[in-house]
Image (cartoon, rainbow, N blue to C red):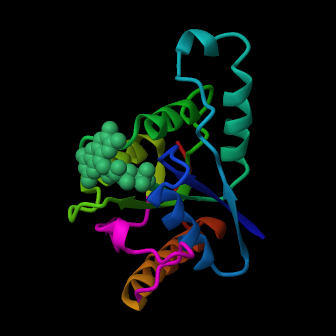
Amino acid sequence: MTQIGIIAGSLRKAAYSKKVATELTNLLPVQFEPVFIDISQLPLYNADLDESVAVPAWETYRRQLDNVAGFIIVTPEYNRGTTGALKNALDIGSKRHNHWKHKPALVVSTSPEATGGFGANQQIRQSLVTLNVTPVQRPEIYLGHVDHLFDDQNLITNPDTIAFLQTAINAFVKLQAKFQIGETEAPT
Ligand code: FNR
């Protein structure tokens, strides 16, 4: 089984980004095991605290990043960027050593607005460049009107939306296979 880290950028219990993340895991082929990585308990990054003995919650989280073969990141948009919680998680994972590097990712943004969290999506992609994470380039997933997507079982019912998400998962699986067989460039 190939473990994939699933990270949702919202801490809210009923977050649409968490529901979308769950839907995406349902579309993964059976050889992939989704591992939900909880970022809600991570203290804010402070380099002073990282100098001697690291904060236990950071170390546990970093091990979770190390143990997976790729990431599915679903973010809402806060003020045209990602959430503070998710940016904090990106930062913590980049220190001691870069726990993200040389892995593939699928970046999905969500919003009740028509813009679909474009700003948040792009902000994460910008950070992934320096973290040496390779995102699926296309399809780009800006999931607008997310508040209208789910039925009362928290399932997406629109077949076109499901088909679109499946194309993104398929692209991620294809990209991940390249990493598995070493077709991608060496990490730096
Ligand atoms: C928002 N929201 C929002 N939406 C958007 O499309 N663009 C934005 O810039 C913002 N900015 C913003 C800032 C803050 C502080 C909050 C709390 C909310 C609305 C946001 O998309 C909406 O609340 C989502 O439902 C949040 O995502 P989850 O928690 O449902 O995943």
Residue 58, x across and y down, in percent: 66, 29
Magenta segment range? 135-158
Q: Nearer the viewer, residue 2 or 120?
A: 120
Instruction: Tell me if 102 is positioned left or right of 139 in this view.
Output: right
* Farthest left residue in view: 114
In this rendering, the answer to whether 149 lies above or below 133 is below
Instruction: Tell me if 5 is positioned left or right of 152 in this view.
Output: right
What secondary structure is the magenta-colored segment mainly? loop
Q: How many marks?
A: 0
Residue 39, x across and y down, in percent: 59, 40
**Which quadrant of the figure has residue 57?**
top right
Q: Is residue 126 visible?
A: yes
Residue drawn at x 59%, y 24% is 43
**Which quadrant of the figure has residue 60?**
top right
Instruction: For the N terminus, give its image quadrant.
Output: bottom right
* Farthest right residue in view: 1
Q: Is residue 75 visible?
A: no
The question of residue 136 being in magenta is answered with yes
Q: Nearer the viewer, residue 91 or 20?
A: 20
In this rendering, the answer to whether 39 lies above or below 57 is below
Residue drawn at x 39%, y 75% is 149
The question of residue 53 being in magenta is answered with no
Residue drawn at x 44%, y 76% is 168
Residue 97, x across and y down, in percent: 61, 31
Q: Nearer the viewer, residue 147 or 98?
A: 147
* Farthest front residue in view: 152
Residue 146, x across and y down, in percent: 36, 67
Instruction: Tell me if 73 is positioned left or right of 1 in this view.
Output: left
Residue drawn at x 40%, y 40% is 83
Instruction: Tell me if 182 is positioned left or right of 133 in this view.
Output: right
